[in-house]
Image (cartoon, rainbow, N blue to C red):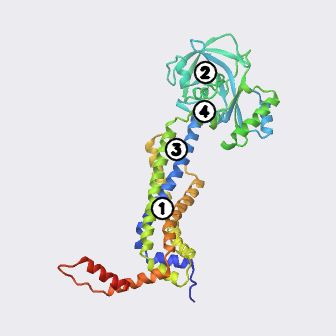
Amino acid sequence: MKKKLTVNTLALGNLRHRKRQYASLIIGIILAMVFSSSVLLMFSSLVASVYQQEKDSIGNQNGIYINATQKLFADAAGKQLVGDYAFARVVGEVFTENDAAYTVAAYDEKAAQLANIQFIAGSYPQKENEIAVERSTLARLDADASVGDRITLRFAVQDGADHSPQINEKTYILSGIASNKLSNISGISSQSNSIPSVFVSEDTQIEPGGREMLVCYFNYYDVNIFSNTENYEKLSDFFLDSGADLGNWIPADSASFVVNNSNNGVYTASVFIILFALVLLAASCLGIVNAFSTNLNERKRQIGMLRTVGATKRQIIMIFGREAFLLSLICTPVSIALSCLIVKVGLLILGEKFVFAPDIRVIILCAFVGIACVMLAALIPLIKAANVTPVQSVRNISITRKAAKKKIKSRKSFVPSDLIAKRSLFFYG
């Protein structure tokens, strides 16, 4: 049974019989796909790096509410305005020699996770006489202490939204030094004075006569960077309708973080790398154009024969375009693997601020964009090749045959004008 002649069979047949001729084209395709994938992977890494830096700097929450009530956030969660939320219990304040106050609070596991408390040294307090302090707060408290040392702090018990006027000295064992959150959030909001930066154990109870204040860490119900503005407006309306004080709300989320950190080195380095990769991508696409043009020029006879038997320009583009498409499919896994390796090594060289977080959706997008770049680059020589007429191809074939039969005798001297004239007569009559 004879095989049916289709675009695919023609393309596959050409690929099988012209493996060596496609070497330069394959290299160009791999390079173009590597650079196009690198641009997308680098952009994805930039987003992941900024997102991770945001979480490390200000926490995992979308917002913080000072002097919160459990009913307020239970109602907000019931109206699907708030998703995850947890409370830190403020039990007092500690003071510097200049009477600058820093809030002391106890966190349960969920609250500590939302606040993203990270320790440079030591760990979260486990006993009632232990305490952990953020690094910048520890420096301001004039406590030149290390983990395990005893530190004496001026402490006042919390009394609702304020603290009691009586300040006493209390001695703690420093269990950990946490990374800064308060100082970073202070750059976003001036209402950050009551955000805890001193931590006591989860089981710590407030002293007799005091009243705890709750600080709520929460995320929006629909966590989406594109809907943060809408979430903010809906939650604002809810707080106003509930009689809550909007001044107690600190919107510490990705939007405010990006605005306040636009001069970060992550942005500058990533933009430079992406622009550099785009230049290399353009050069690779130009290489594909040249390689495919050369390949098609060598196959004008085949194109002419197809045109002679009735192939249309569209069919010529489909036949030879299918070859480029099949080659790009073959090169896709290798190209994406190389892109991932290059981007990962590059980010490791650039430093800890950069995070390589490949996503399956980004990988699929890399494949589509890489194939699209290859096909667009191949389209330029394909359109030119499709314009070859049957008459032109037949004429070129007859010239080639005549040239193959012609015997050229070497001479010591010759007249160029005579040779040109004889050549024109021989080939063109």
Q: Looking at the rendering, which quadrant does residue 125 occupy? A: top right
Which numbered tag is attached to residue 334? 1
Give 421 or 108, whichever is nearer the viewer: 421
Q: Tag 2's secondary structure?
A: loop
First reached walking from the N terminus: tag 2 or tag 1 = 2
Q: Which residue is mark 2?
A: 129
Q: Which residue is mark 4?
A: 58
First reached walking from the N terminus: tag 3 or tag 2 = 2
First reached walking from the N terminus: tag 1 or tag 4 = 4
Which numbered tag is attached to residue 355? 3
Task: Check whether the beta carbons of the residues at disc 3 and disc 4 lie within 8 A of each other.
Answer: no
| Residue in the image at 70% along x and 20% along y | 206
Q: Nearer the viewer, mark 3 or mark 2?
A: 3
Residue flagged by tag 4: what amino acid is it? Ile
Badge 4: few (under 14), some or many (20 or more) residues near its Cα, within 10 Å? many
Residue flagged by tag 1: what amino acid is it? Val
| Residue in the image at 59% along x and 23% along y | 130
Quarter of the picture containing the C terminus is: bottom left
First reached walking from the N terminus: tag 4 or tag 2 = 4
Badge 1: few (under 14), some or many (20 or more) residues near its Cα, within 10 Å? few
Residue flagged by tag 2: what amino acid is it? Asn
Q: Is residue 126 in view?
A: no
In the displayed image of the protein, which residue is found farthest to the left? 412
Q: Tag 1's secondary structure?
A: helix
